[in-house]
Image: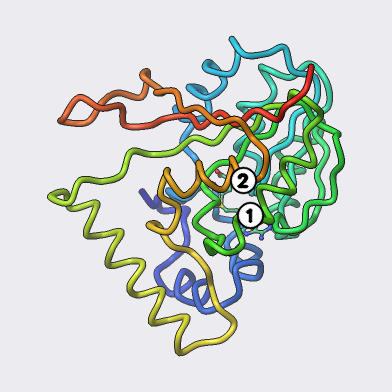
Amino acid sequence: MFSAQGPTFGELCVQALSSVERGYDLLAPKFDHTPFRTPRGILDATAEALAGLGPFTDGLDVCCGTGAGMHTLRPVCDGRITGVDFSAGMLARAQDAHPDATWVRADARALPFVEGFDLAVSFGAFGHFLPRERPAVLAGIHRALRPGGLFALAVGAPAPLTSPAYWVEVGFDLVMRVRNAVWRPPFVMYYRTTPLRALRDDLAAAGFEVRVEPLSTLGAGRDGTPRCGLVLARKAGAR
Ligand SMILES: C[S@@+](CC[C@H](N)C(=O)[O-])C[C@H]1O[C@@H](n2cnc3c(N)ncnc32)[C@H](O)[C@@H]1O
């Protein structure tokens, strides 16, 4: 949740009326005090799951924000770790927090890397891509990986229809659709536009072999199914 050091309601409104890039530039100084930063538990559970799938040399965090994903990449990569994001404000914070990593400013829909990494991760950002934009993002990640490289994406279980979370997500997406219909520039952020089946289909179309593993350490919902899973997408070829 938001802490006292987090953004005020007014600041959040100004950010939400900006473009995604500008909105994050404005939010950057307070981003680490918001619930939008991926919690450490998810980062650590992902690192734990990846530890058995390495070794990895060079790692990339796509839409790195202020650098949360470095906590996942650092323990599993023994080479260079890199974050890419299009918000200069977020990258400046990331650079301050992790000066040993490499930071690249680029749009994830046109990633500038070619076979430079063995592992790519991304946290909390796919809601910023429209379904029609996802293929370009995934093609860029596929291109960025060396043969045999792995892309890992932590995903939450869909909220059940009867839960308050489901209706909060539906309500949020509805507000954003209205906002984007009447206001320019758009701020693309939707909770319910990246269902697992569509993501799997797009990953397969990009050339990945895909499987999903439960992140069991993050617990289970009332029905016993895991709260979070890890999508593991492997690029063909020998490592
Ligand atoms: C919710 S934040 C998540 C940041 C970080 N991954 C984390 O988990 O704390 C989403 C990030 O995605 C970045 N982003 C959104 N769309 C992007 C795009 N098209 N290209 C590059 N970065 C993008 C934003 O600038 C922001 O830093």
Q: Looking at the image, do the residues carrying marks 2 and 1 touch, with CB atoms under 8 Å apart?
A: yes
Q: Secondary structure at mark 2?
A: helix
Q: Which residue is drawn at the image coordinates 27% and 67% (left, top)?
A: 171
Residue 38 % position (x, y): 50, 40
Which residue bears the numbered disc 1? 135
Of circles 2 and 1, which is in front?
2
Which residue bears the numbered disc 2? 205
**Residue placed furthest toward the left:** 162
Q: Which residue is drawn at the image coordinates 70% and 58% (left, top)?
A: 109
Q: Relative to 174, does residue 168 appear above or below in the rendering? A: above
Answer with the quarter of the image where residue 167 lies: bottom left
Residue 40 % position (x, y): 49, 30
Where, quadrant-wise, is the C terminus in this rendering?
A: top right
Alpha carbon distance from label 2 to label 1: 8 Å
Q: Is residue 187 left or right of residue 116?
A: left
Residue 216 % position (x, y): 36, 19
User: Looking at this view, is 101 or 131 the one in front?
Assistant: 131
User: Looking at this view, is 30 or 239 the one in front?
Assistant: 239
Q: Which residue is drawn at the image coordinates 36% and 67% (left, top)?
A: 173
Near mark 2 (Cα within 10 A), the count class, few <14, some 14-19 or many ≥20, is few
Q: Is residue 100 left or right of residue 181?
A: right
Q: Amino acid at mark 2?
A: Ala
Q: Earlier in the sequence, mark 2 or mark 1?
A: 1
Q: Which residue is drawn at the image coordinates 67% and 52% (left, top)?
A: 137
Q: Secondary structure at mark 1?
A: helix
Q: Relative to 66, does residue 89 appear above or below in the rendering? A: below
User: Looking at this view, is 75 or 11 the one in front?
Assistant: 75
Q: Is residue 180 left or right of residue 76?
A: left
User: Looking at this view, is 165 or 34 the one in front?
Assistant: 165
